[in-house]
Amino acid sequence: MNGWSKAVVPRLTDGMPPPSPRHPELLVREVEWLRPLQWLALAWRDMERCPTAGVMHGLILAVIGGAMFWFARHAFWWLAAMLSACMTLAPLLAAGLYEISRRLEREQDASVADAFRVWTQGDRRLRLFGLLLALTSGGWLLCSAALIHSWLPASVYSPADFVRLVVLQPNFGLFELWLLMGALLAAPMFASTVITLPLLLDHPTLSLHQAILTSWRVVALNPMAMALWAGLLCLFTALGIGSAFLGLVGVVPMLGHASWHAYRDLVDHDAHAH
């Protein structure tokens, strides 16, 4: 292991059977809090080596997001649903970029076909994880709507209504509570997804339950690094969306490749578990 990190090896209780070959034991590493900057640097290297796949992923999400925004721009709740759908779609779409980074790491050829082949393999775990993300996104919308409609005497229909009645309201409370609720829902979602998809892709026999638990262990062991990584994800995503979705052409491949390197830095496979 390099000087950046150290492995934390879980201890087995006396008398417990060894891990099943179908469910390998995973070692979680502790890294320095500035390590996410290194993941972004490694992502740029992957983008230079295989730019076409990254650009295509970014274009797909930019077109989908731009089209959704255009059709829902006058209806706030439809707009919120569309943006939430894009946030749900992004980590799933990035699965192809994880495959590109994995192949480049192994000095193998990587192409667009390799990226999209991930979705033709019929991995039930990816479909189930996508369903869980969709349910989480829908839950946030329902909670958000319930909070706003129970607090305000007037209804929010358009984005202008939301800005006027929620963001710019003179009384302290609703907007701050709305932000707090969003943060409380986003935190467990981040902890459940930060390395789950690349982990599933790299370990075909790993259960979705074990992958999500490993993701939580990573966050618990590296709170500062994960806080910085979450901030970088939010910052670059906001820049991509705020640039009329055009910035997603570069943001999506950068964050996708960086997420793979985050996984490789934070989780180590125990060969003795096989």
Image (spheres, rainbow, N blue to C red):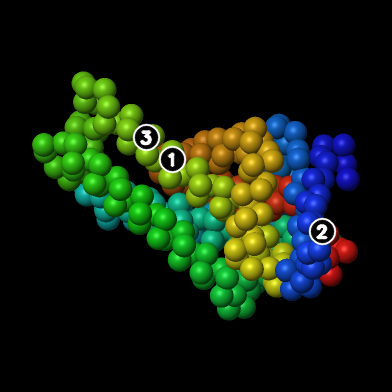
Q: What element carries label 1?
A: helix
| Quadrant that contains the N terminus | top right
Q: Alpha-carbon distance for marks 1 and 3? A: 9 Å
Disc 3 from disc 2: Cα separation: 46 Å
Residue assigned mark 3? 179
Whether residues under marks 1 and 3 lie with C-beta atoms below 8 angstroms apart, the answer is: no
Examine the rendered structure and indicate whether residue 93 appears above or below residue 9: below
Q: Determine whether the residue tagged by mark 3 lies in a helix, strand or loop.
A: helix
Q: Residue at x 65, y 32 (%)?
A: 224
45 sits left or right of 70 in the view: right
Disc 1 target residue = 184
Q: Where is residue 32 in the image (x, y as percent from the top left)?
A: 75, 33
Amino acid type of the residue tagged 3 in the rendering: Leu
Identify the residue under disc 2. Answer: 14
Identified at 59% across, 75% down, the residue is 123
Residue lying furthest left: 153
Q: In which quarter of the image is the C terminus?
A: bottom right
Q: Which of marks 3 and 2 is in front?
A: 2
User: Which of marks 2 and 1 precedes in the sequence?
Assistant: 2
Viewer-nearest residue: 23 or 172: 23
